[in-house]
């Protein structure tokens, strides 16, 4: 019962650490070595903007020979079924967004119209596999591949630029242009009326910061959960020591040193922590952390992160709790 009591507190803290690492990976992991040309209201990489051919002409006049055009938009009837789309030229597939193919094949010029690659998070959320159909704005697209790159783009459906333009009725217009850093234009510049230069990943960072602001509150809750865990362990150890105070007195009178009592308490707490940590880890993984997968906002869902940083941090904090409790 002592171990289960500790396990509940441990599960709460483990969930908070995992949630934090998931947010960092989802919103803040895109490489920022490209500049993005978009409408000045921002958010072009997620919710899109609309740029006409005059913007492309302006970029070429200023030394950018091959700006990378893309469509970025969120389609759907509500936030619950919203899907982020990305339209690109097949030759630019991994130029802007490197990825790892999970299953299927990559999109090429030879593929028929209405073919798409979807991110691993989107596939898991909608329970789709290669060969299935996905409905995007009332049109069916055939899934030919599933990819992942560790960012919010794992929630996107990737298709050819032409298909994306037809899907959202953009004609020859695009949402954004990507240009190399270090040229005529720099981040923060306004190059024409209503068109400005941003940094790749800034849109995701903005959404991430808004989400992280709520996490700061959860972090405060987590701190108090940690304090409660220390107090709980200290109280359990004190109770164990109090119940055995006569035995400890007899042991000490027979010549055993203070280290004997400390070893006893250390053995007890290691047993409590190991059993409680295992129970709490299972509870967090199958109940609390599992619910993160079902969260979706603005077409972005989260994929829980388990890595050595998360495990190491949780282990270090747990040991710290243990030694503080033993000391008290």
Image (cartoon, rainbow, N blue to C red):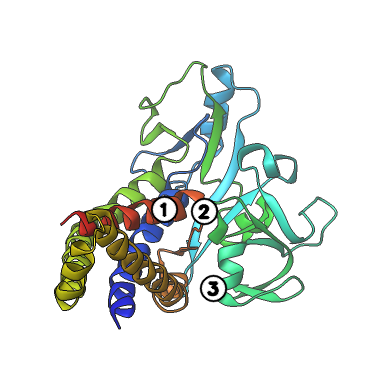
Per the image, the residue denoted by label 2 is: 307
Judge the density around disc 1: few (<14), some (14-19), many (≥20) Cα neighbours within 10 Å.
some
SS at badge 2: loop
Give the label, 3 or 2, closer to the camera.
2
Tell which circle, 1 or 3, labels the residue nearer the N-terminal end: 1
Q: Residues within 10 Å of mark 2 (few under 14, many from 20)?
A: few
* Pointer 3 residue: 125
User: Which quarter of the figure has residue 118?
Assistant: bottom right
Nearer the N terminus, badge 2 or badge 1? 1
Mark 3 or mark 2, earlier in chain: 3
Badge 2 vs badge 1, beta-carbon distance below 8 Å: yes
**Marker disc for residue 21:** 1
| Position in image of residue 195 (x %, y %) | 40, 34
Measure the alpha-carbon separation of dots 2 and 1. Answer: 9 Å
Give percent across and percent down for residue 196: 39, 32
SS state under label 1: helix
Q: CA distance from mark 3 to mark 2?
A: 22 Å
Neighbour tally class for label 3: few under 14, some 14-19, many 20 plus, Cα within 10 Å = some
Name, please, the residue furthest toward the bottom.
Answer: 1
Quadrant into which the C terminus falls: bottom left
Q: Secondary structure at mark 3?
A: helix
Residue 258 percent across, percent down from the top left:
22, 55
Say which residue appears at 40% left-offset and 28% top-offset: 192
């Amino acid at each position: 019962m002592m171990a289960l009591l500790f396990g509940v507190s441990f599960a709460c803290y483990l969930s908070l650490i995992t949630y934090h690492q998931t947010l960092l990976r989802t919103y803040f992991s895109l490489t920022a070595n490209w500049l993005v040309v978009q409408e000045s209201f921002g958010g072009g990489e997620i919710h899109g903007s609309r740029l006409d051919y005059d913007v492309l002409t302006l970029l070429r006049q200023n030394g950018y020979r091959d700006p990378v055009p893309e469509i970025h938009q969120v389609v759907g009837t509500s936030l619950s079924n919203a899907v982020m789309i990305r339209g690109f030229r097949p030759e630019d597939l991994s130029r802007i967004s490197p990825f790892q193919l999970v299953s299927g094949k990559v999109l090429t010029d030879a593929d028929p119209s209405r073919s798409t690659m979807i991110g691993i998070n989107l596939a898991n959320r909608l329970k789709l596999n290669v060969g299935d159909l996905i409905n995007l704005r009332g049109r069916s697209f055939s899934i030919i591949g599933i990819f992942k790159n560790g960012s919010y783009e794992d929630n996107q459906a990737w298709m050819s630029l032409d298909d994306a333009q037809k899907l959202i009725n953009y004609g020859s217009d695009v949402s954004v242009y990507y240009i190399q850093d270090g040229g005529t234009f720099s981040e923060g510049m306004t190059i024409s009326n209503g068109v400005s230069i941003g940094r790749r990943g800034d849109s995701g960072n903005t959404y991430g910061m808004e989400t992280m602001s709520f996490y700061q509150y959860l972090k405060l809750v987590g701190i108090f959960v940690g304090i409660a865990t220390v107090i709980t362990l200290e109280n359990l150890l004190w109770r164990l020591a109090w119940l055995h105070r006569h035995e400890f007195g007899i042991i000490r009178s027979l010549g055993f040193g203070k280290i004997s009592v400390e070893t006893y308490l250390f053995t007890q707490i290691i047993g409590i922590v190991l059993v409680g940590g295992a129970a709490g880890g299972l509870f967090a993984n199958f109940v609390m952390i599992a619910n993160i997968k079902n969260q979706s906002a603005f077409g972005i869902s989260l994929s829980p992160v388990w890595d050595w940083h998360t495990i190491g941090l949780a282990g270090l904090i747990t040991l710290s709790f243990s030694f503080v409790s033993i000391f008290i």
